[in-house]
Amino acid sequence: MTALVEQVTAVQAAGLAPRPPPGRYAPPRRGIDPDASKKWWQRMLPVVLSHKRIVFTGLACSLATLLLQLAIPRLTRLAIDNALAPALAQRSGIDLPGASEAQPLTRYIWILAAVAVIRFGIGFVYRYNLQRTSFNIEYDLRNLIYEKFSVLSFGYFDRMQSGQLISRANSDIRSVQMFLSFAPTVVISMITFVCAFGLMASVHLPLAIVAVICLPGVYITGTRMRQKMFPVSWIVSSRQADVATIVEENITGTRVVKSFAAEESQINLLSKAAERLRWAGKLQVDIRARYSPFLQNLPRIGLALVLLYGGKLVIDGEVTLGTIIEFNAYVVLLQMPFMMLGFLMMMGQRAAASASRIFEIIDEAPEIVDRPGATDLLHPDGDVLFDDVTFRYGTGPAVLDHFTLHMNPGETVALVGRTGTGKSTAARLIPRFYDVTEGSVRIDGIDVRDLTLESLRAHIGLVLDEPFLFSETIRANIAYGKPDATDEEILDVARAAGVSEFVDKLPDGYDTAVGERGYTLSGGQRQRIAIARTLLVNPRILILDDATSAIDVQVEHEIHGALTTLMQGRTTLIIAHRLSTISLAQRVCLLENGLITADGSHAELMATVPAYSEVLARAEEEWQEAHAPKPDPQAELPPRARAMRRMASAKAEGGPGGMPGMPGLPGAGGGA
Ligand SMILES: Nc1ncnc2c1ncn2[C@@H]1O[C@H](COP(=O)(O)OP(=O)(O)OP(=O)(O)O)[C@@H](O)[C@H]1O
Ligand SMILES: [Mg+2]
């Protein structure tokens, strides 16, 4: 996860972060309430209320729809009692007690038809507005989270799994959105319940009580179900995230998986996670299967009771026939809000859990932000100073320990050291991907923490060993840091970086799509595009972190010209293991045990510092071994992996400082 963020930020660091075309992106009008002591829905309220107009229109219309719905059973009763029953009695010559003259049935039919038409219209407005609200909320939440991701520091992405983050940005938002769009309807249904009960009670209170007597049972069963369901749904969503993480890693890391022939173990890993998800899913289904029949059938008992007791009342002449029909219709109408109430509570629990996971992201304070009063870095000379810097990742050991390094404007310095000594770490401190633990990093004498991040990163270009390209065209990738670049500018940098050499041979030229992460191109081609992309934003300070390690000597030779062009007139920090790359620098510094132990020209260091030649020899040896075909199964591994394995086994064997014995210095001085 961090690697990807670093790549993207590295590109953004090379220029002002790309902005979507103005006017296209409508940022959320209101954020989430920052007061963490409030209930989750209170914290969401500002986001919901930022869409007041549609929210309240929707609510008002849904209330009107439900009230109209209440009128239907009453109208039906009146039609039966005032039109049908008297007409029937007249025809049969029966004298109904208290019956008046039969009214025309058509009058009621017309009224019912009018109610239906009005309900249709208002119902449309209410659904349309409430649905729109819920999609607006979803849109806002997603943007709020993404905005947060974009300001969170590397330390955060080091700790978090991408699958977890993706699941928060998808399913958690969905469950909050579903709840928020569903809740108002249920609340309004409860109002309907009160009104309906009032209407029934006004006719016959005992029968009204009998009609609703089973509904609390629906509620209690619903509550039980949700109590059982809540922990299970939490488990389900976290296991979904686990599966997502594995799938995501397998897709992005598919080359690694295949190169280690690890498909089977990966499938096993996935099937284990999927099995755990299935187990939790089954539990969920079990609970639902046990409680749902009760939820659905309890209201039917209510119907039977109305028929039983109401029937007796009709026979005794206490209520009219129409009353039973009216009450029956109300029971059917009312079971819904009660069933939904249970469901709503369940969804509420789930939404609360989802919201708390979303808030975890929203409440995360970015570690690296602009200080109050931070100034913009304008037209820097490019003087870079690491002043007595100590740095540790979190609470880990000090990676840099009183590290001091000064780079003059326009100077090219190579930083050399064994793997894992902290070269990349030092480079990450210049654009403030991390902040120093002690000491300071200064540009033109100004502490980087006193500069605005945007202006600081705008002057720093970073080219990494495995450049990350976006699955877009070559042109878009080159223009990533400067989306408004003209074709001429793009062609200029493409020529300088040696991109035009191979792009001109492609049928679609600069409009060729590069495939995900640029994997349809060779390492050297990707690297040249990365160089062009950095050239385009013209940074004052340039960092090449192992920019040549992934490519072979021949290709490296080809891009040397591009690199030399890139370095001209900039302060450049080259991190390299290979002599040919180091030879691009005027000065070489050796990093050991967290600080610079030697500083001078390559020739001086070769002559006077044995540790320096050892580091180079080791790198060379590793490279040679990695590229010589051997029957060794490890030969399948990429050079870096091989080196790491060897280091690890040397450590395990207790080799001196993790280094195996030094052979001669094959080819170490070759290019001196
Ligand atoms: N994000 C991180 N969180 C915690 N520790 C880290 C992190 N990145 C690097 N480290 C640790 O810091 C140390 C220095 O790592 P760094 O990547 O700077 O080494 P390097 O000199 O660039 O090595 P290489 O030549 O292999 O690229 C290592 O011990 C590494 O394990
Ligand atoms: Mg490194």
Image (cartoon, rainbow, N blue to C red):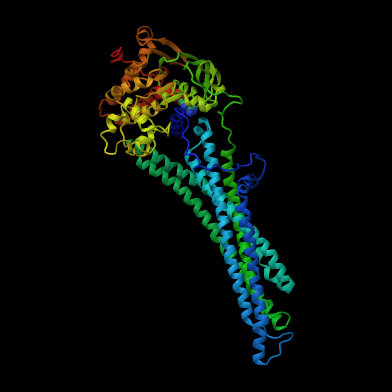
Q: Residue 433 in the image: state x and y as whole percent.
A: 50, 27
Q: Residue at x 66, y 61 (%)?
A: 190
Q: In the figure, 167 relative to 433: above or below? A: below
Q: Residue at x 38, y 22 (%)?
A: 650
Does residue 177 appear to the left or right of 74 in the view shown?
left
Q: Residue 340 in the image: state x and y as whole percent.
A: 60, 60
The total number of labels drawn is 0
Q: In the figure, 595 relative to 274: above or below? A: above
Q: Is residue 221 among what the camera can see? A: no
Does residue 490 appear to the left or right of 116 in the view shown?
left
Q: Residue 424 in the image: state x and y as whole percent.
A: 44, 23
Quarter of the image holding residue 263? Answer: top left
Quarter of the image holding residue 584? Answer: top left
Q: Residue 104 in the image: state x and y as whole percent.
A: 64, 83
Does residue 74 appear to the left or right of 531 in the view shown?
right
Does residue 652 appear to the left or right of 496 in the view shown?
right
Q: State the residue in front, 454 or 484.
A: 484
Ligand 2 shows up in the quarter that is top left
